[in-house]
Image (cartoon, helix red, strand yellow):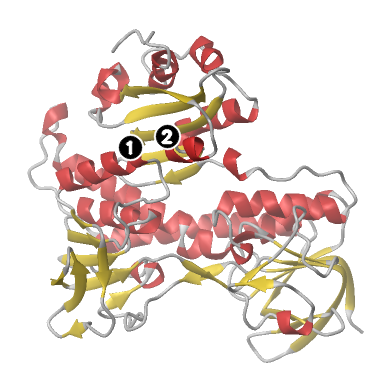
């Protein structure tokens, strides 16, 4: 006889497992189906392992250039096997932590591939071929996404990689081409450059980080080039030009002519594809648009008892977005009053060196929406703590509505900005004005002083310009 649940969640990533814990808190009997390991891509093949590698790259680069701090280390070397071991230790520790949380919440976890039947049962195919059927009042799809590839540039594990294969590299190449200058591409470019790899980024758009504020894109490109990363924008990789041999080569159309790029390895970083195939969508009347599942503001599909969250519904494909969407979906199932998630309030981060963080509208977006805006911008080079850190590149940029001084957007490039963005995220949630931000006392010395100064700069009142 099939086991009964209040909610069955297909996918145990940051959307699925957080939703499961919230369901348990609300007293709902809950099951999670995960084909690999709970934690999903974020923990095992994305956010956490890549940031562990980025941290090792940062430490290595800082040690090599320690002279400015009076630290002389002429015999610095890199043990990449230990770098990878540290990454695995961190992910394993967090994996065990999630397992403990699910067990603590009395949440049943099934290892296998889940799909929805015509009868709205959830069918599980385990790795050993066993078939399990679950009945549930509600179903939550949280199956995540996988790296997108380009025709002719499919990953082969030797010459061509996506981020999945790159995370498992046993040795570093001496050179690499990265196709795609978005968030993931720039993080890998920064990391590999800090590890000493010769990096070339080939981006189709006219700038890297094309979804960020233009001032941010320009600054990051300048600083990446300063570090030695070659960046080629406005370049279209031509299909069927991949060559493999001693290394790898591709040809791109750039400035009206064909240009060949060659390196030891090629990393394709051109976005992600939702995992919507093989989960039984064809058995239900669920609307799909370009592979993404369509939902309402409570994450219900066109079948009211079937919900979907995270990368499978598009929007901002971020772990923290998936988690919040999961909480909203579960609370709606439980009959709680919910508020729609405002994506303009979601902080976005790029964990490159230097870091990038933003929340709200870019300057261009604000003007397109009809706002009259004022801008406050302040450089880290005028901040004492940044000089102490030896990381004085970058700035804080605030965008406010002209008549009310209400914060519309915040954009930062520089040291530890991914930690500082939360202050501006809270300010945005609370409809704060630049005066509110400038009246917030920032400790001295602190990197966050740049936020207060940027708020003052909106009206030309910055102190340390």
Mark 2 element type: strand
Task: Assess disc 2: are there few (<14), some (14-19) or many (≥20) residues with their C-alpha within 10 Å of its C-alpha.
Answer: many
Task: Assess disc 1: are there few (<14), some (14-19) or many (≥20) residues with their C-alpha within 10 Å of its C-alpha.
Answer: some
Which is nearer the eye, 75 or 182?
182
Does residue 153 appear in this view?
yes
Drawn side of residue 379 relative to residue 308, left or right: left
Residue 93 spot, x, y in % from top left: 52, 55
Mark 1 element type: helix
Residue placed furthest toward the bottom: 129
Quadrant in the rendering for residue 127: bottom right
Q: How many marks?
A: 2
Q: Quadrant of the N terminus?
A: bottom right
Residue 464 spot, x, y in % from top left: 30, 10
- Say which residue appears at 46% left-offset and 27% top-offset: 399
Which is nearer the eye, 55 or 408?
408
* Residue 461 vertical placement versus 104 (above, below): above
Drawn side of residue 248 relative to residue 155, left or right: left
Does residue 172 appear in this view?
no
Residue under circle 2?
411
Drawn side of residue 132 relative to residue 5, left or right: left
Residue 119 spot, x, y in % from top left: 87, 83
The mark found on residue 229 in the picture is: none
- Say which residue appears at 45% left-offset and 38% top-offset: 362
Residue under circle 1?
215
| Distance between mark 2 and mark 1 Cα atoms | 9 Å
Drawn side of residue 201 relative to residue 118, left or right: left
Residue placed furthest toward the front: 370
Q: Nearer the viewer, mark 2 or mark 1?
A: 1
Do tag 2 and tag 1 residues touch (Cβ < 8 Å)? Answer: yes
Quadrant in the rendering for residue 192: bottom left
Residue 118 spot, x, y in % from top left: 83, 85
């Amino acid at each position: 006889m099939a086991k009964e649940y209040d909610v069955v969640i297909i996918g145990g990533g940051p959307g699925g497992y957080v939703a499961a814990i919230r369901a348990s808190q609300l007293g709902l009997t809950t099951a999670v189906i995960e084909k690999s390991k709970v934690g999903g891509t974020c923990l095992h093949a994305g956010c956490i392992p890549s940031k562990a590698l980025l941290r090792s790259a940062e430490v290595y680069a800082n040690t090599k250039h320690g002279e400015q701090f009076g630290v002389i280390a002429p015999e610095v070397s890199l043990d990449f096997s230990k770098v990878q071991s540290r990454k695995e230790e961190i992910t394993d520790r967090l994996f065990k932590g999630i397992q403990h949380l699910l067990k603590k919440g009395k949440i049943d976890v099934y290892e296998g591939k889940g799909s929805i039947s015509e009868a709205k049962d959830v069918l599980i195919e385990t790795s050993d071929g066993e078939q399990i059927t679950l009945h549930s009042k509600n179903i939550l799809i949280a199956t995540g996404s996988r790296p997108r590839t380009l025709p002719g540039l499919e990953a082969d594990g030797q010459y061509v990689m996506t981020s999945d294969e790159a995370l498992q590299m046993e040795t570093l190449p001496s050179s690499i081409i990265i196709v795609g200058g978005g968030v993931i591409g720039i993080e890998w470019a920064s990391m590999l450059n800090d590890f000493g790899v010769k990096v070339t980024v080939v981006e189709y758009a006219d700038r890297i980080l094309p979804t960020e504020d233009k001032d941010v894109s320009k600054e990051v490109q300048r600083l990446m080039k300063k570090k030695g990363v070659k960046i080629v924008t406005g370049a279209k990789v031509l299909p069927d030009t991949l060559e493999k041999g001693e290394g790898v080569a591709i040809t791109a159309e750039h400035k009206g002519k064909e240009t060949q790029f060659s390196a030891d390895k090629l990393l394709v970083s051109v976005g992600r594809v939702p995992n919507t195939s093989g989960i039984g969508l064809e058995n239900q009347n669920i609307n799909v648009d370009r592979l993404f599942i369509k939902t309402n503001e409570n994450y219900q599909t066109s079948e009211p008892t079937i919900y979907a969250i995270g990368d499978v519904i598009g929007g901002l494909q971020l772990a923290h977005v998936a988690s919040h969407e999961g909480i909203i979906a579960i609370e709606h199932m439980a009959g709680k009053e919910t508020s729609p998630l405002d994506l303009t309030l979601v902080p976005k981060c790029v964990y490159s060196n230097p870091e990038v963080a933003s929340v709200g509208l870019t300057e261009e977006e604000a003007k397109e929406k009809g706002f009259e805006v004022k801008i406050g911008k302040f450089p880290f080079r005028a901040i004492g703590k940044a000089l102490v850190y030896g990381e004085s590149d970058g700035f804080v940029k605030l965008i406010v509505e002209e008549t009310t001084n209400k914060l519309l957007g915040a954009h930062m490039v520089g040291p530890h900005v991914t930690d500082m963005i939360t202050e501006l995220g809270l300010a945005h949630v609370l409809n704060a004005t630049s005066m509110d931000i400038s009246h917030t006392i920032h400790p001295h010395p602190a990197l966050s002083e740049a936020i207060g100064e940027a708020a003052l700069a909106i009206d030309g009142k910055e102190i340390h310009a």
